[in-house]
Structure formats: structure tokens, C-alpha cells
Amino acid sequence: MAKNPNGKSPKRDNSLYGATIFFLAACLAEIYLLVLRRYYIHGDVVTEALPWHNRLLIFAGLGAAALVLGIALSVLWKADQRKRLIGWCLVGLGVFFGGGSMLIRLYFESAVTLLSVVVPVVMVLTVIWAFYDRECSVAMTALSGTLILLWMCRRLFNHLTLGLPVKALAVVYVLLLAGVCWLAKNKKLGNLLPPDADLLPIYAATGLSAAAVVLGLFSSAIAYYAMWALGIVVFILAVYYTVKQL
């Protein structure tokens, strides 16, 4: 009799462990953003906002330290998958606290709002990558990134300083989607996608995403409606793959 009749159980245990760690890290990041919104964005300028403006530099430094430590632990614990996840979480927190704190100092409420959207999306995608089929994970990642980008286009389309960078980012994102399709077609995504994966969901997701982003470059109103249309696609895809997993 086999020692482990269910060959996938250790993998699922590791996936659950990793998803839990990332979930807790995302909750910590979201609490940080809520505190910043209360005291830095909407707080009293002299007694709350200004002290937090200086504290953001401290958090950026702590984030940089966590990033370096996370990279070191990931390399040190390369052979132990569970311990290595801790290192990757430190890398993620380091990027968030280091880069996010500096971004908030530069763009204030716009950056806080953007990060408040990105953090829950990343948290959900972590669960999807842990438990769902790889083709679903790649497709949902592409669609989620597109939704965030369309949201940015809608809010910052006519912004004096951020409008042009957002549009340039949209062009780069479309090229990135084309690169993902090419890599998937030529089986060059490595461990991210098994050789026998169904590529149709990836082609559909990247194609719809590219079309939505291109249309969103014309006006903020088009970006708004494209965002809703893609949101419906994401919901349908999530329901389909959830039923399939069950």
C-alpha cells in the first residue's frame, strides 16, 4: 500500500500554507494603508500628516531592509519550500513598504487608493495560483492586471503629470500581453505552465485585455465601460474554474 494514497496532498498542504502566509501579509499591508488614509491623507496637517510624512521614509528604509533579508533567506532556504515562502513574503513586504511608501510620499491619495486596490487583487491571485489550474491562473492574472490598468486610465487619463506615464504603461502592458502569448505558444513559460495546458483561456484573456487597454487609451469613459465588461468576464471565468475545481 502506498504511503500517500493522495499524491497531491503534500502539494496542496504547501499551497494552503503559502496562501495563508500571503493572506496575512496582505492583511498587514491593507491595515497600513488604512492607517495612512486616516492619519496621513485625512488627518490634521500639523499634528498628524507632517509626522507621517517623515515616518514614510522610515517605513521605506525598513522595506528596503526586509527586501534584502527576504532575498537572502530565499537563497539560503532554497531547498526548503516552506521556509522559502517566508523569504518570498519578506520580499513582497519589502517591495510594498519600500516602494509603496515612497510612491505615497510623491502622489499622496492617488497612490494610497491605487495600492488599496492592488493589495486585495494580489491576495486573491495568490489563492488562484495556489489552487487553480495554471492556465486559469495566467488568464486571471492578465485580466486582473488589465482591470487595474483600466482603473488607472479612467482616473488619471487627463492628469497633468500622470496622464502620459499611464498611457505609456498601457502600451508597454499590451506588448507584455503579446509576449505572454508568444511564450505560451512556444512552451517557454517553464514551470508556470505545463506542456499539456489548454492555451485557449490564455489567448482569450490576453486578447480581450489588449483590446480593452487599446480602447481605453481613447477616453476615460471607454476605459470605464471596458473595465465593467472585463469584470463580467473575470466573474464568469472565476465561476467556471471554481466549479471545475470542485
Image (cartoon, rainbow, N blue to C red):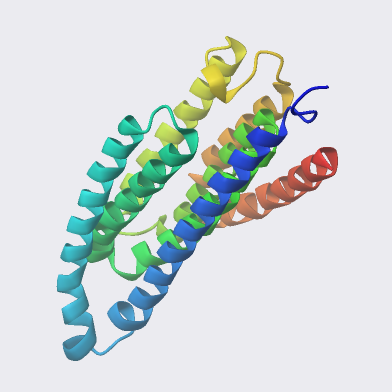
The picture quadrant where one finds residue 225 is: bottom right
Q: Is residue 77 above or below residue 189?
A: below
Looking at the image, which residue is at 30% across and 51% down?
Answer: 94
Looking at the image, which residue is at 60% across and 52% down?
Answer: 124
Q: How many numbered marks appear?
A: 0
Query: Can residue 133 be spotted in the picture?
Result: yes
165 or 35: nearer the viewer = 35
Q: Name the side, left or right, on which 101 lies relative to 37.
A: left
Looking at the image, which residue is at 42% across and 55% down?
Answer: 157
Looking at the image, which residue is at 54% across and 43% down?
Answer: 146
x%, y% of residue 150? 52, 50
130 or 6: nearer the viewer = 6
Q: Residue furthest top?
A: 186
117 or 20: nearer the viewer = 20
Quadrant showing the N terminus: top right
Q: Is residue 47 above or below residue 175?
A: below
The picture quadrant where one finds residue 224 is: bottom right
Query: Can residue 161 be spotted in the picture?
Result: no
x%, y% of residue 125? 58, 46
Quadrant showing the C terminus: top right
x%, y% of residue 234? 70, 47
x%, y% of residue 26? 47, 58
Q: Is residue 190 above or below residue 171?
A: above
